[in-house]
Image: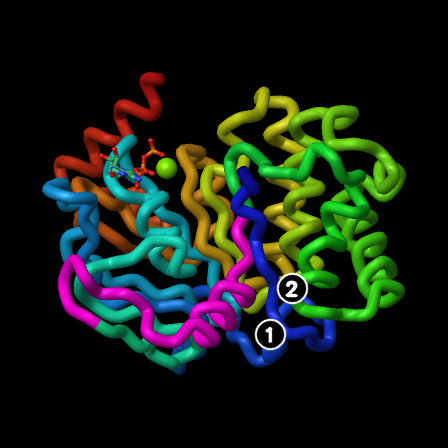
Amino acid sequence: MTPDAPLCDAPHSGAPDPGAAEIPAAGLRSAEPAAVIEIRDLYKSYGQLDVLRGVSIAARRGQVVSLIGSSGSGKSTLLRCCNLLEDSQAGEVLFEGEAVKWRGEGPARRPADRAQVTRIRTNLAMVFQQFNLWSHMTVLQNVMEAPVTVLGRARADVEAAARRYLDKVGIGDKAEAWPAQLSGGQQQRAAIARALCMEPRALLFDEPTSALDPELQQEVVRVIKDLAAERRTMMLVTHDMKLAADLSDHVVFLHQGRIEEQGPPDQLFGNPKTDRLRQFLRAGTAA
Ligand SMILES: Nc1ncnc2c1ncn2[C@@H]1O[C@H](COP(=O)(O)OP(=O)(O)OP(=O)(O)O)[C@@H](O)[C@H]1O
Ligand SMILES: [Mg+2]
């Protein structure tokens, strides 16, 4: 009944990403920044269906990591495992170096510490393909909801921040509108403002532009590019290869629940090494 409203983290400065100034420019990373979110050798199945089969991936502070791969390869599942919206059966999930505590094993494995789950989930704000705004709340109320109710932050402070983020994504004038009165691109930008208002340590995007017409996609792409320019930590599932190529520090190609190939975008898109990736990229070009 409730949409998968992203949760938010403990309030901090509101600055884009703490420590961002210390982040070396992409490609100059001699000492790599710490991972905000990392999974190691993760296995996930739905019943008999093995969806993730030993995947390791990390989004380091200030990095944009894109996940690409054909439909059903496990991209959304991987993103959802990162913020513990899905259980996994083996492997590790680490948030800022802190490993998730588990109880039980295999299919019975569950997170052991609810407070830890909440802490992690509230620090990884998710933006979905279908926006998932509350239809009975104005745009401003949507953006304010979780910081007030989940984090218990002061309403006046949250409202000021919410208006700032709505301005940032270019829809400050829509604060009092209802979601149904917005275009798809505006709704997605409201969803991004809602995620930002939680001051998360990282943003997880699951095909944020897929539900939009090309023209509206560009509005959202511009906002995501601005966020990347601020060196926010992001993990992005996308079918938009141009977006992945333009934004990413690192691209991961998933195939049938395994990482088939990964590397910097120039390498992955310019010089794919595996037949499967070549085939995937060709199919995308032909589409
Ligand atoms: N809740 C679920 N129950 C059972 N099977 C599921 C569930 N969610 C996903 N799956 C299956 O897991 C596999 C991976 O799904 P997932 O949604 O992660 O793929 P994806 O790479 O995100 O695909 P797409 O590009 O179409 O979004 C698919 O075979 C899918 O049918
Ligand atoms: Mg998906």
Tell me the kind of residue under disc 2. Answer: Val
Q: Residue at x 87, y 38 (%)?
A: 176
Q: Which mark is residue 150?
A: 2
Q: Which mark is residue 20?
A: 1
Q: Determine if the magenta segment contains residue 128.
A: no
Q: Percent position (x, y) of residue 213?
A: 58, 20
Residue 242 or residue 60, whichever sits in front: 60
Q: Residue at x 78, y 25 (%)?
A: 181
Can residue 145 be seen in this snapshot?
yes
Q: Residue at x 31, y 77 (%)?
A: 101
Tell me if mark 1 has few (under 14), some (14-19) or many (20+) residues whose alpha carbon lies within 10 angstroms of its own. Answer: some
Residue 279 or residue 42, whichever sits in front: 42
> What is the quadrant of residue 40 in the picture?
bottom left
Residue 266 or residue 182, whichever sits in front: 182
Q: Is residue 118 above or below residue 47?
A: below
- Report the span colored magenta: 104-126
* Drawn side of residue 87 relative to residue 194, left or right: left
Q: Percent position (x, y) of residue 264?
A: 35, 55
